[in-house]
Image (cartoon, rainbow, N blue to C red):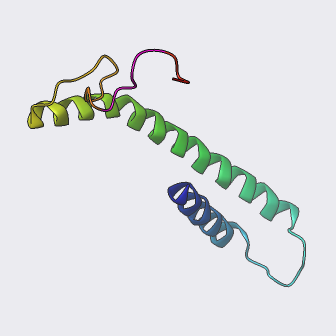
């Protein structure tokens, strides 16, 4: 959650600095609003691409780390000690 909030705050600050140039009015101009929408959309798309790549790499990284430490690897790609126990979730 902390990392998400940091990314959100950085994105907000970056887009605000890039798009809002006149602080004399309470409301955004149409141009500023359009700029903010496109800036935020670009950064969200970039973040989704990065997270997709990260999610794709994590199992391989965990397997490599487990192999380096000699821990057996479970079916999910996690070290066997981190795999969820088989059986009903409530037991």
Going 58% across and 41% down the picture, which residue do you hit?
A: 45
Image side of residue 91 versus residue 77, left or right: right
Q: Which quadrant of the figure has residue 13?
A: bottom right
Residue lying at the far front of the rendered structure? 91
Q: Is residue 83 magenta?
A: yes
Instruction: Report the number of discs.
Output: 0
Quarter of the image for residue 82 reads top left
Image position, residue 44 (x, y; %): 60, 46
> Would you say the magenta stretch is mainly helix, strand or loop?
loop
Residue 3: image location, x then y, percent: 50, 57
On screen, residue 51 above or below 6: above
User: Is the residue 20 above or below the residue 40 in the image?
Assistant: below
73 left or right, relative to 35: left
Residue 42 sits above or below residue 30 on the image: above
Q: Is residue 52 above or below residue 1?
A: above
Which residue is nearer to you in this view: 67 or 3? 67
Please tell me which residue lies in front, 3 or 15.
3
**Residue drawn at point x = 79 percent, y = 64 percent:** 32
Magenta residues span 82-87
Residue 41 falls inside the magenta stretch: no
Q: Quadrant of residue 28?
A: bottom right
Q: Is residue 78 left or right of residue 47?
A: left
Q: Which residue is drawn at the image coordinates 89% and 80% (left, top)?
A: 25
Residue 8 in percent (x, y) is at 61, 59
| Picture residue at 30% right of the left edge, 28% below the top | 78
Q: The N terminus is located in which quarter? A: bottom right
In terms of depth relative to the viewer, which is nearer, 59 or 33? Answer: 59
């Amino acid at each position: 959650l902390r990392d998400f909030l940091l990314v959100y705050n950085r994105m907000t600050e970056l887009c605000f600095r890039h798009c809002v140039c006149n602080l004399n009015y309470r409301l955004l101009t149409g141009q500023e609003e359009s700029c903010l929408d496109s800036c935020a959309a670009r950064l969200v798309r970039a973040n989704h691409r990065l997270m997709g790549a990260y999610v794709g790499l994590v199992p391989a990284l965990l397997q490599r780390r487990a192999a380096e430490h000699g821990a057996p690897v479970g079916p999910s790609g996690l070290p066997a000690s981190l795999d969820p126990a088989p059986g009903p979730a409530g037991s």
